[in-house]
Image (spheres, rainbow, N blue to C red):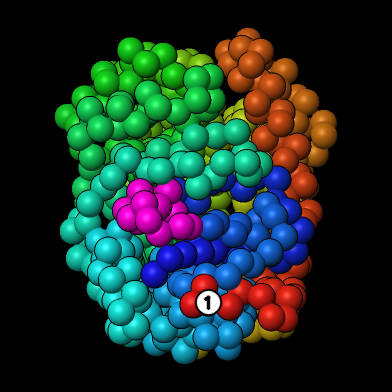
Amino acid sequence: MRHVTFVRPALGEGPSADAMTPLVFAILRALTPPEIATTLIDERIEPFVPVATDLVAMTVETFTARRAWEIADAYRARGVPVVVGGHHPSMVPEEAGLHADAVVIGDGEAVWGEILRDAAAGRLRRRYEAAPGAGPRPMPDRSIFAGRRYAPVSLVQVGRGCRFACDFCSIHAFYGTHREQRPVADVVAEIETLPAGRMIFFVDDNLLFRRDRFEDLMRGLAPLQRRWSCQISIDVARDDRLLDLMAAAGCALVLIGFESLRPDNLKQMRKNWNGVAGTYDDVIARLRARGIMLYGTFVFGYDADRREDFEKTARFAEAMGMAIANFNPLTPMPGTGLISRLAAEGRLLRPTWWLDPAHRYGDAIFHPRAMTPDDLRDGPTAARAIFYGLGSIAARALRGLPRWGLVATGLMLLANVVSRREIARKQAAPLSAGRGPEPDGEGAPCG
């Protein structure tokens, strides 16, 4: 075994302006013996230019599954073994096994050393199952990203799993009830190696793991004087002490899943706890008072939704001065309670939508209760057009400037412009353009 190629497939065609570093490959590079060379091919930011290699390792998301299987099939046709992992293969290992020599179920670092040894011996197993929390957590080797143009954000992971079990969430399907968090000292040591002045984004699905550990993390971050953002559950806003600690520790922006303005929808998605911190207006006011920008996410398609909710929700996000917002059609992901329920009710239009050549990004995947599938496709687009209109962007920036400051407001404007571009690029695009992954004769094993 002399060479491993890591591959990150892309959705659709063309470079992505908001692509962030695929952190998983920096972790796997750190666990790869130094005598084994590695190459990263990230289709989101560069053309697919293969190299001769002994093994291909891919992380696969549901939206990129079709493209991933195209690449995997092409490599295997040339005699190169392929191992796939990530959320999608973990949820549908039988499907993944049709296109890969080995499928990893769970977090890959726990079995990466074993995979390398087995591949070198020519005896890859069909499946490798990693128990949650079983693997090592090395300092990521970010040298694998050198020379590539990613978004200027440093990704750091503190923990895995989430305290909640929302109906639509693939994170709960992947981790179940397991939750873990790294020691604060390890997180601080990693951040100290990252470029000064660059925004940090904690990729945890919910940074609020446990109150005492969250307080320890905030106290550990404060002396670093770094600006950071995170995903976090709305219940953090019922605790003024935690919000004060976040602001003092350098929190610039939080992503919160508001999901819906309708209580019946929140109950159906098992997220009625969204009200524990008070009304959405109260939550936003507490964040605003501390100069913390807000990235709100909303989803449409639950049973109480009506056509008028698209504009109503966009106007709400606009009026609340959200820095960024996402408006998405409800997407049933494999392994979730949502897709099982919709299948049992006979409401799925395309049960394996991620493989369907006719599916386009943004298409409705099921029959909503109170609108048509076309309404569910077009409504989120209309909401985005309102929120990301140039007038809306300018008005929100001017309102936020006194609280956020000049630098943060500039980043907000850049993020909005990038979001406008990415929305236009992806909407109605096929999940794979069917392009060939490599020129004939290349990508063969090193031998």
Is disc 1 placed on a helix, strand or loop? loop
* Residue at image point 55% right, 34% down: 153
Q: Residue furthest right?
A: 390
Classify residue 400 as left or right of residue 39: right
The quadrant holding residue 135 is bottom left
Question: In this view of the protein, can residue 282 be seen by the observer?
Answer: no
The residue indicated by pointer 1 is 445
Residue 291 vertical position relative to residue 447 in the rendered view, above or below = above
* Residue at image point 63% right, 44% down: 148
Q: How many marks?
A: 1
Q: Position of residue 276 (x, y in %)?
A: 32, 38
Q: Is residue 310 magenta?
A: no
Classify residue 219 as left or right of residue 265: left
The quadrant holding residue 175 is bottom left
Q: Which residues are magenta?
A: 24-38
Q: Position of residue 361 (x, y in %)?
A: 68, 67
Q: Is residue 27 magenta?
A: yes
Amino acid on which the number 1 mark rests in the picture: Pro
Classify residue 186 as left or right of residue 224: left
Q: Position of residue 265 (x, y in %)?
A: 46, 58
- 105 or 194: nearer the viewer: 194
